[in-house]
Amino acid sequence: MNETETTDPSRRGGLSVVAGRAAQNSDKGRGGFARPETRAAPALVSFDRRELRILFDLYGAKVAAGEWRDYAIDFSPARAVFSIFRRASEAPLYRIEKNPELGRRQGAFSVVATTGLVLRRGHDLARVVAVLQRKLELVRAE
């Protein structure tokens, strides 16, 4: 140790031992390593278990009827999207979106057609996806 070095661990560059572990000083200029920045990842909007059950019940019924064949789920910080495809290589027939920013106004859930037309929007997912369920019509033979 020479005259210019200090014995205070907080003033030395590089690694110092604190409570039995190697710790880094935040001083980059003296040979210490830069600490990686700890940024919290943005929270993703997602469907909860109850919502997924509603979506997969509808999807399963339509697959059994031979109308739908594929789906995709996308999560982002702004919204969650359940896309429904007739074939995997096509554009989605419908998108069921959850957008919490619209939750207090128009409703967080919406069903959007391929053309971008919003078929239904609301606060309750079960009522919103009812627009996609086939309604039986009575046909009279005369």
Image: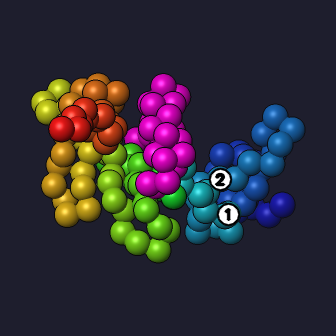
* Magenta residue check for 62: yes
Q: Dot 2 lies on which element?
A: loop
Q: Quick one: label 2, few (<14), some, or many (20+) residues within 10 Å?
A: many
Q: Which quadrant of the view contains residue 129?
A: top left
Please check the rendered image and state whether residue 63 is part of the magenta-colored stretch, yes or no: yes
Name of the residue lying farthest toward the bottom: 89
Q: Quadrant of the C terminus?
A: top left
Q: Is residue 80 above or below residue 88?
A: above
**Residue 107 versus residue 39 in the image, above or below:** above
Furthest toward the front, the residue is 142
Q: Amino acid at mark 1?
A: Gly
Residues shaded magenta? 42-68
Q: Is residue 26 above or below residue 31?
A: above
Residue designated by label 2: 25
Residue 113 appearing in the image: yes
Query: Where's residue 65, x and y in %?
Result: 48, 47
In the image, residue 53 lies at what x, y percent? 51, 31
Query: Are the two marked residues, 2 and 1, in contact with CB atoms closer than 8 angstroms?
Result: yes
Task: Please provide percent x and percent y for residue 46.
Answer: 44, 40
